[in-house]
Amino acid sequence: MDQQPGNRDDIRHFLASRRAKITPAQAGLPTSTRRRVAGLRREEVAVLAGVSTEWYTRLEKGHIGGVSEDVLDAVARALRLDDDERTYLFDLARSSRPAKRAPSRRKDVEVLPQVQWLLDSITMSSAFVRNGRTDVIASNPLARALHAPMFDSPTTDQRGRPNISRYIFLDPGARQFFTDWDAAGNATAALLRAEAAREPHDRALRELIGELCTLSPEFRGLWAVHDVLIRHDGVKRLQHPDVGQLELTFQSLDLPLSGRAVHNLVTYTAEPGTASEERLKLLASWAATQTQETR
């Protein structure tokens, strides 16, 4: 099976964009006022990586399938890639190698009952499980109350499962719900970029990315930047329609699964003693009441 042109494009644009971010001074190279580009030239990356200019030029054109891990490591160091970017580069290399047989389609894996029990036992934090395509495939009552605008969005599928990416980029209400929408959008596009390299044969993922590129100029611009993110943690500020402003800490944990499926447990927690904790407790009380009423 030949390397796909789209894969070559991803490699070319990614390496060129990382090269453009590094100045000669940052790389410890002599500087000149007559430079036409702010970042490194190809020949400078080649010197830093210990390879010939011709070889690196061929690599940046997308011919990466037969490259050894040692050379990829050298290029990653020369371009000062972080851990996520390095993983992305290695995933691109792996997916560009000719396959001895047709690649198998990744199967969706349902959430185990034990995981749902775990989610339901978490009462003071919002908790949900998302897959690599950012589908929310399981949640606890507080997650559904906290993210009610997303769960109620017309971007949810026929089963009522939200997709975080569709909500952020295709529902205008997301800009009000996420106080820092730009940060949420940047992170989401970067997560999808990393997943696309890890699972290049996921048809549903390709369709999602195509849909977002077609319908969202903002996503299309972020996709072209080639930023990569594998794990996402930090602080999220939300404007909830019922309880107002919330500042929450969120964390993402990998759930062990067989095969290539990806499930992440994502929790949102308030700092003790804050107004956000009181508001989250109010949401938790409402969620518990609604759960009891539906039983």
Image (cartoon, helix red, strand yellow):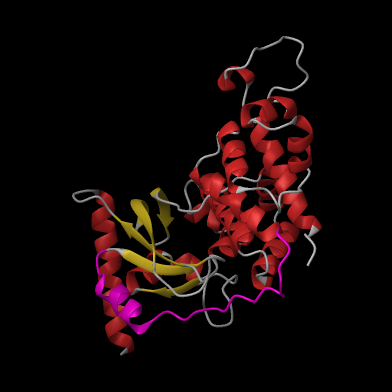
Q: Is residue 30 left or right of residue 252?
A: right
Counting from the top left corner in percent of width and height, residue 276 is at: 29, 52
Q: Nearer the viewer, residue 12 or 166?
A: 12
Q: Is residue 284 left or right of residue 37?
A: left
Between 1 and 194, the residue placed more toward the observer is: 1
Instruction: For the C terminus, give its image quadrant.
Output: bottom left
107 or 162: which is nearer to us?
107
Instruction: Residue 114: say if magenta.
Output: yes
Please report the residue visible at 77 percent of the width from the left and 56 percent of the height from the top. 6
Which residue extends farthest top? 33
Residue sitting at 77 percent across and 50 percent down? Answer: 9
Tell me: 278 left or right of 149. left
> What quarter of the picture does the N terminus occupy?
bottom right
Q: Quadrant of residue 257?
A: bottom left
Q: Estimate the x, y position of residue 214 in percent, counting from the top left.
A: 75, 60
* Relative to 193, residue 14 above or below: above
In this figure, what is the number of numbered marks?
0
Which image quadrant is residue 95 in?
A: bottom right
**55 over 255 or under it: above or below:** above
Please name whichever residue, 39 or 128, is drawn nearer the observer in this view of the structure.
Answer: 39
Q: Position of residue 87 (x, y in %)?
A: 54, 50
Query: Residue 127 in magenta?
Result: no
* Outermost residue to the bottom: 295
Measured from the top left, where is residue 5 in percent x and y? 81, 56
User: Which region shows up in magenta?
Assistant: 97-124
In the rendered view, tell whether residue 190 sits above or below residue 103. above
Main SS category, magenta section: loop
Name the residue at 35% across, 66% down: 127
Name, please, the residue furthest toward the left.
Answer: 273
